[in-house]
């Protein structure tokens, strides 16, 4: 609830200018990058259960603490620490999904997790908007307490003593030194391509709503409905699509198709004229690209890991998305402001084509790698 309304909270409740509010969100993004890297390292050392439990408890406390601060510098420091703790949860969570699933249903497991995230984001945003219109400070208490509540639920249901699938730290298998994610050249290329993909995708939540309002003259209510359409389509269709495609084991092909569709969803504004129906069409295309690519991206990196280095791989993957979340909205808004939306949409389309070509190259290199291992 807090993050979507953080800028409004800082400008309306704390009366900071928009520039300072934007800087706080940039600090949050930097903390998220650090959290992804730190969470991955800690997961490999202490296990995914302990990291998730610690991140939820500490993050919940920091949310409540943040709501009590008024000093700008203190807010920035607290936001950085909060983001670091909050995003350290992600690599541990991704590693947990790999532990609790089987190879034949792993992509579906990640899709189910994405479904829960989308539903939580949708419900949380709706309730958060209602609460924010009455009392911003309640957002911090509710977000903090739900984090702590999730930690309690994790402790009750998935503690090693209560769930045999959760490995206890003392029982972790000692193996020979495993390779580092930083020495996996193909994976590092994948991380860069993920940043390019995310750079394009995050325009959906950053620059596209502004374009809808300024250039297509859509109302805020209709823009909100368009944004909700993305989550609704995912909730209704992603699991069925992944269930159908996963057995075919053509993961990289789906990622390539999804990347091209994301680029097309923005470039379409420069290709055909339209108003509300064009906004709907673009949202359907970008959502299709998201459903084809993101679940199978998870499958790609998880297949290159073993239990002892899985956290490090997950940490790099999480950091890639955090980097894209920082760079995408900032660079996209600058291009739109100085060169116009037409230039931005062509740029996003071109980056998507480059990304798709990169994923194609990665597919060929991965096939070559597999043949060399036979």
Image (cartoon, grey):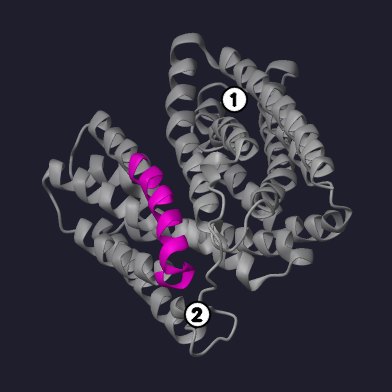
Residue shown at 75% from the left, 45% from the top: 292
- Horizontally, residue 302 falls left or right of residue 179, namely right
Q: Is residue 358 above or below residue 249?
A: above
Tell me if residue 39 is in the magenta stretch. yes
Tell me if residue 234 is in the magenta stretch. no
Residue shown at 56% from the left, 66% from the top: 175
Q: Could you give the CA–CA distance between mark 2 and mark 1, rounded to whole angstroms?
A: 58 Å
- Dividing the picture into quadrants, the one containing residue 67 is bottom left
Q: Residue furthest left?
A: 71
**In this view, the mark in front (2 or 1):** 2
Residue shown at 81% from the left, 55% from the top: 241
- What label sits on residue 216 in the rendered view? 1
Q: Residue furthest bottom?
A: 162
Quadrant containing the N terminus is bottom left
Q: Can residue 372 be seen at all in this image of the molecule?
A: yes
Region of the chain picked out in magenta, as a range: 30-50
Residue under label 2, please give it. Answer: 171
Q: Is residue 343 above or below residue 151?
A: above
Residue 97, image x, y percentages: 60, 66
Ranked by sequence position, the earlier of labels 2 and 1 is 2
Residue 333, image x, y percentages: 45, 23
- Dividing the picture into quadrants, the one containing residue 51 is bottom left
Query: Element at badge 2?
Result: helix
Residue 215, image x, y percentages: 56, 21
* Residue nearer the viewer, 254 or 46: 46
Query: Element at badge 1?
Result: loop
């Amino acid at each position: 609830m807090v993050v979507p309304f953080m800028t409004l909270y800082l400008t309306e409740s704390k009366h900071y200018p928009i520039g300072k509010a934007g800087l706080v969100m940039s600090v949050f993004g930097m903390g998220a990058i650090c959290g992804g890297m730190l969470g991955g390292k800690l997961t490999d050392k202490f296990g995914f259960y302990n990291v998730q439990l610690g991140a939820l408890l500490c993050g919940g406390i920091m949310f409540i603490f943040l709501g009590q601060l008024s000093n700008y510098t203190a807010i920035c420091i607290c936001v950085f620490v909060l983001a670091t703790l909050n995003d350290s949860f992600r690599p541990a969570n991704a590693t947990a999904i790999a532990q609790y699933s089987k190879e034949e249903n792993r992509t579906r497991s990640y899709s189910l997790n994405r479904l829960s995230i989308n539903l939580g984001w949708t419900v949380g945003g709706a309730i958060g908007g209602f609460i924010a219109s009455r009392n911003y400070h309640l957002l911090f208490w509710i977000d903090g307490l739900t984090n702590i509540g999730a930690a309690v639920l994790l402790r009750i249901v998935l503690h090693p003593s209560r769930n045999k699938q959760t490995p206890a730290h003392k029982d972790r298998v000692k193996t020979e030194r495993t390779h580092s994610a930083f020495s996996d050249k193909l994976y590092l290329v994948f991380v860069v391509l993920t940043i390019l993909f995310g750079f394009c995708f995050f325009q959906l939540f950053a620059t596209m709503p502004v374009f809808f309002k300024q250039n297509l003259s859509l109302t805020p209510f209709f823009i909100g409905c368009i944004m909700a359409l993305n989550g609704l389509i995912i909730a209704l269709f992603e699991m069925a699509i992944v269930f159908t495609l996963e057995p075919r084991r053509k993961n990289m092909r789906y990622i390539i198709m999804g990347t091209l569709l994301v680029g097309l969803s923005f470039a379409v504004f420069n290709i055909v004229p339209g108003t509300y129906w064009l906004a709907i069409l673009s949202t359907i295309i970008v959502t299709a690209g998201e459903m084809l690519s993101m679940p199978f991206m998870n499958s790609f990196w998880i297949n290159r890991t073993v239990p002892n280095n899985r956290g490090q791989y997950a940490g790099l993957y999480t950091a890639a998305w955090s980097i894209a979340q920082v760079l995408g909205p900032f660079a996209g808004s600058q291009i739109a402001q100085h060169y116009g939306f037409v230039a931005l949409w062509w740029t996003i389309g071109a980056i998507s084509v480059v990304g798709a070509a990169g994923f194609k190259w990665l597919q060929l290199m991965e096939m070559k790698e597999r043949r060399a291992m036979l």
